[in-house]
Amino acid sequence: MNEHPKYNRIFTIVIDSLGIGAAADAAAYGDAGTDTLGHIAQCTEDFKIPNLQKLGIANLHSLHGVAPAEKPTGYYARLHEASTGKDTMTGHWEMMGLHITKPFQTFTETGFPKELIDELSARTGRTIIGNKSASGTEILDELAEEEIATGHMIVYTSADSVLQICGNEETFGLEELYRCCEIARELTLRDEWKVGRVIARPYTGKKKGEFVRTSNRHDYALKPYGETALNAMKDAGLDVISVGKIYDIFDGEGLTESNKSKSSVHGMEQTIEIAKKTFRGLCFVNLVDFDALWGHRRNVAGYAQELEKFDVKLGEFLTCLKDDDLLLITADHGNDPTHTGTDHTRENVPLIAYSPSFTGSGKLEDESSFAVIGATIADNFGVPMPKGTIGHSLLAQLK
């Protein structure tokens, strides 16, 4: 480990789903012509993201109504995903060095296969209702009264790679809900049914309009398929602090501290507070509202407003950075709110790098993997990347 790293602290902020144009293989995913950020700018009058603009986002990717900075303060590059798929876990795992060749399954359009539902029903002893993509609040209003009355079990999914099971805390019981989720997790380890997470969704209430999801949610996530840059950092005695969904995405692997966020704005507020503290290592942040609230719901205006709110908080955060801090801003996939369907979109993502100590700035070469992020972080601290990982460091180019 390097006792005198170039940067003492590295903040990596993932704007979940902020793609910047269709990847070269987008057509194979049904995503030709997608451009999350570009289409948002095109559809938004008076789009204001001044802090991202100063860092160079409009120099990297042409944006309607947002002029390129004359003197950008950051370095910027376009990253293409090497792994197969376009989901959250694949994108983040690749950032930290893993090359995923088998994508996680999504069942957004069709629901889960009859074979999976039949086996889950037989193993749990419960009749399954739902089995479709839905919002958690909507499916409770639709089916929770039936579940309470009959003992049937609500199973549903979303646009992400998840299988979710609802259970009323009083009539279904928490322990029974967890038991059923453990069975679902075991079944969905098979390649043909493999989902990233099984989620227990407990709730209270007795009739439509009164149902409330509780804090006893439990995620049954897959652990990363191998060690990542996070494990290497933690094993070297460095701080690895997570904000938002990072804990769930990595199932806690390689983290020394985790912070749950109520929203993307809250996540930035947490990151600002962390920046005011002393630590040595990485603060890894996922801001999920862009994806969950706006991208999947194809809400262009909501996505644009969320970006503007993020930009305000980014301005506050930048004032907290010290000369020996490094900021990396990126995304894990696209989710073009102007595209058909509700799924993620296969897009390139931005990488923006900034430090108050930079004497240079500008365009870096396009990269064929997200893994340059983890490799750069590990290189800064003189920590070898785990065996079998991919990616190379960009540290020498950040001056």
Image (spheres, grey):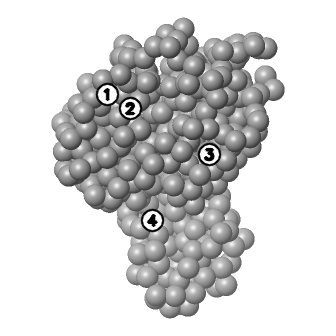
Could you say where residue 357 lies in the image, as x and y percent from the top left?
A: 57, 19
* 261 displayed left or right of 366: right
Q: What amino acid type should be assigned to the residue bearing mark 3?
A: Ile
Instruction: Say which mark, if any, is on residue 272.
Output: 3
Q: Residue at x 45, y 65 (%)?
A: 156
Q: Which mark is residue 54?
A: 2
Residue 294 vertical position relative to residue 320 in the rendered view, above or below: below
Relative placement, left or right, of 188 versus 39 is: right
Disc 3 is placed on an element classified as helix
User: In front here: 284 or 165?
Assistant: 284
Give the residue at x 50% y 53%.
264
Q: Amino acid type of disc 1?
A: Ala
Q: Which residue is mark 1?
A: 69
Which one is closest to the eye, mark 1 or mark 3? 1
State how far apart marks 2 and 4 are (Cα). 42 Å
Mark 3 Cα-neighbour bin, 10 Å: few <14, some 14–19, many ≥20: some
Query: Of the residues shown, which amino acid type is indicated by label 2?
Result: Lys
Residues packed near mark 2 inside 10 Å, few (<14), some (14 to 19) or many (20 plus): some
**Residue denoted by label 4:** 156
Q: How far apart in space, not on screen, are marks 4 and 1 (Cα)?
A: 45 Å
| First reached walking from the N terminus: tag 4 or tag 1 | 1
Distance, label 4 to label 3, CA atoms, is: 36 Å
Front residue of this view, candidates 193 and 6: 6
Report the residue at 38% width, 17% height from top.
Answer: 362
**Marks 1/3: CA distance?**
25 Å
Q: Which mark is residue 90?
A: none
